[in-house]
Image: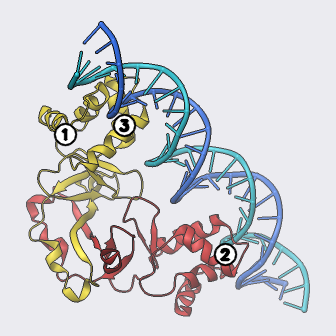
Chain colours: A red, B yellow, C cyan, D blue
Amino acid sequence: MSDLLDRLRDRGWRLTAQRRVVAEVLDGDHVHYTADEVHARAAGRLPEIARATVYNTLSELVAIGEVREVSTDGRAKRYDPNTRHTHQHLVCEKCGTIRDVHPQGDPVAALPEAERYGFAIQDAVVTYRGTCPDCARG
Amino acid sequence: MSDLLDRLRDRGWRLTAQRRVVAEVLDGDHVHYTADEVHARAAGRLPEIARATVYNTLSELVAIGEVREVSTDGRAKRYDPNTRHTHQHLVCEKCGTIRDVHPQGDPVAALPEAERYGFAIQDAVVTYRGTCPDCARG
DNA sequence: ATCCTACATTGGACTAAGTCCAAGTCAAGA
DNA sequence: TCTTGACTTGGACTTAGTCCAATGTAGGAT
């Protein structure tokens, strides 16, 4: 985590208490909070933090590539701090749980030239949809 | 298109003027309108149609599998009437244009058992992101 | 150690996308 | 043609997110 703070400082970021707690909240594996969830957790440590600040900070983290924006369900966007290793997502249709997964091969290679319509393709986002073990039991 | 109306009638739908124009708007290839775009086009033919009716009709069409809901960008959902042939989407990052594409192979097969976390996987949604020829020239 | 100031934060108003509901309308079967 | 339950309406409401003027402060300059 402190390495993230270091990277931010290297970029000339002012290290405010607010940015610190947002960065702390976004620490860990399989973390995919919505902006409101980040705000709620950040407010646990720094009660007066404003929603606008959380949105600002998240947008900045996305802009510099430290956090990925994920919109799996057309509802609130989620923020994924794991940008070190490229990965895709596995989502439970019932409860919305998200796991990071690593499929084999390159999905971009599966798209034939004739299907590219002259686009310069940058990447492919894959979302696996299914039912998690907990929901299957329920 | 009238085959869609037939299928709806077979399901016991009341064929109102409103449902008719929504179905007509959603006719064609590479159609991916937002709810508001559907409403605007429908209102061209039936000026008094309410937004709520368009939302209702779209939800029903999605529920019975005649239309697919697509959320590529975390903004408004788009509605895709092409559900006969499974396909994925190619999106231009700049202008938002969407094309239907047909990648080779089954993306679900690319996910190793060890990466499935006990989920029962139903399908995979793939979004190719890139820049379309028009935007590349601009 | 303190001062400055450009950058950051705040909170409240605003927008976009979508949902909900009570009252009115109408498609289609009897 | 009548009836009725399904459908539509429009406006209020919710959720997610953006914007902005006023205020605060991190960190370099002195």
On screen, residue B130 versus residue D12, left or right, reads: left
Identify the image quadrant of the N terminus of chain B: top left
Q: Picture coordinates of residue D28 (x, y %)?
A: 71, 84
In this rendering, the count of numbered labels is 3
Circle 3 chain: B
Q: Nearer the viewer, mark 3 or mark 1?
A: 1
Task: Name the amino acid, label 2.
Answer: Ala
Between discs 3 and 1, the one toward the N terminus: 1
Between the C-alphas of marks 2 and 1, the distance is 50 Å
Residue A128 in view here: no
Q: Quadrant of residue A105?
A: bottom left
Is residue C15 positioned above or below B115 on the image? above
Write down the residue under mark 3.
Answer: B54
| Chain at tag 2 | A
Structural crowding at the residue carrying mark 2, measured as other residues with C-alpha within 10 Å and reported as few (<14), some (14–19) or many (≥20): some
In percent of the image, x 60 and y 77: which residue is there?
A41
- Residue B11 shows which numbered tag? 1
The quarter of the displayed image where residue A130 is located: bottom left
Residue at horizontal 38 percent and vertical 23 percent from the top: B47
In the rendering, at what x and y percent does residue C17 appear? 44, 48
Mark 3 residue element:
helix
Q: Residue at x 24, y 35 (%)?
A: B13
Distance from disc 3 to disc 2, alpha carbons, whole Å, reads 39 Å
Give the secondary structure at mark 2. helix
Looking at the image, is mark 3 or mark 2 nearer the viewer?
3
Is residue B67 something one can see in this rendering?
yes
User: Can marks 3 and 2 be said to lie on one chain?
Assistant: no
Residue holding disc 2: A43
Indicate the secondary structure of the residue bearing disc 1.
loop
Amino acid type, label 1: Arg
Left/right of residue A60 with respect to residue B55 in the rendered view:
right
